[in-house]
Amino acid sequence: MSTSKAKSKVQPLSDQEIQQTYSRLQNELQSLAGKIGELEQEAEEHGLVLSTLNEALQVEPGRKCFRLIGGVLVERTVKDVVPALQTNREGIKKVIANLTEQYTAKERDFETFKRDYNARPISRA
């Protein structure tokens, strides 16, 4: 019974609608992939800064460092900044995991759409 419902949900679309939906889904996937890439790079940068600051934390925890917060450069100590950076990096990793799940779901939808409508990219010769 659920199989017949699933097949009845596939509504006939015009060629133009199929092309627009194909392009939209493809663009959404590219956008998600780009955002994931940006956030992965940001998490990596946080990791590099943390590794440097962790060395300073062991030697001189009261050492001054500067942090950019909302466009304002603020003076802090290493021992104050390290926990905040760790929290930020963990938050970024959670967002990456969430976006990766969204990407996977969107990719499944795209594959289902391509299979249901026998959609392929238009070759530009």
Image (cartoon, rainbow, N blue to C red):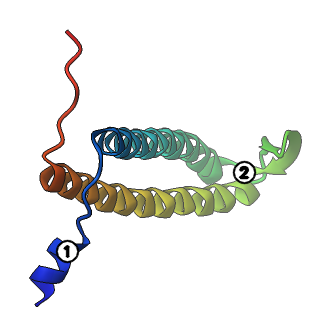
Q: Which structural element holds mark 1?
A: helix
**Residue appearing at x 65%, y 62% in the figure:** 83
| Vertical order, 3 against 66 (above or below) | below
* Amino acid type of the residue that numbered disc 1 sits on in the rendered structure: Ser
Q: Which one is in front, 36 or 87?
A: 36
| Vertical order, 98 against 30 (above or below) | below
Left or right of residue 39: residue 26: left
Distance from the alpha carbon under mark 2 to that under mark 1: 61 Å
Where on the picture, by quarter, is residue 119? Answer: top left
Q: Position of residue 33 (x, y in %)?
A: 39, 42
Q: Position of residue 36 (x, y in %)?
A: 44, 46
**Residue appearing at x 56%, y 62% in the figure:** 91
**Residue appearing at x 23%, y 59% in the figure:** 108
Q: Which one is in front, 110 or 54?
A: 110
Q: Are marks 2 and 1 in contact (CB under 8 Å)?
A: no
- Which circle marks residue 31 in the picture? none
* First in sequence: mark 2 vs mark 1: 1
Label 1: which residue?
8
Q: Which one is in front, 49 or 12?
A: 12
Quarter the N terminus occupies: bottom left
Left or right of residue 82: residue 38: left
In the image as oriented, which residue stretches furthest toward the top?
125
* Amino acid type of the residue that numbered disc 2 sits on in the rendered structure: Val
Label 2: which residue?
78
Q: Which one is in front, 105 or 91?
A: 105
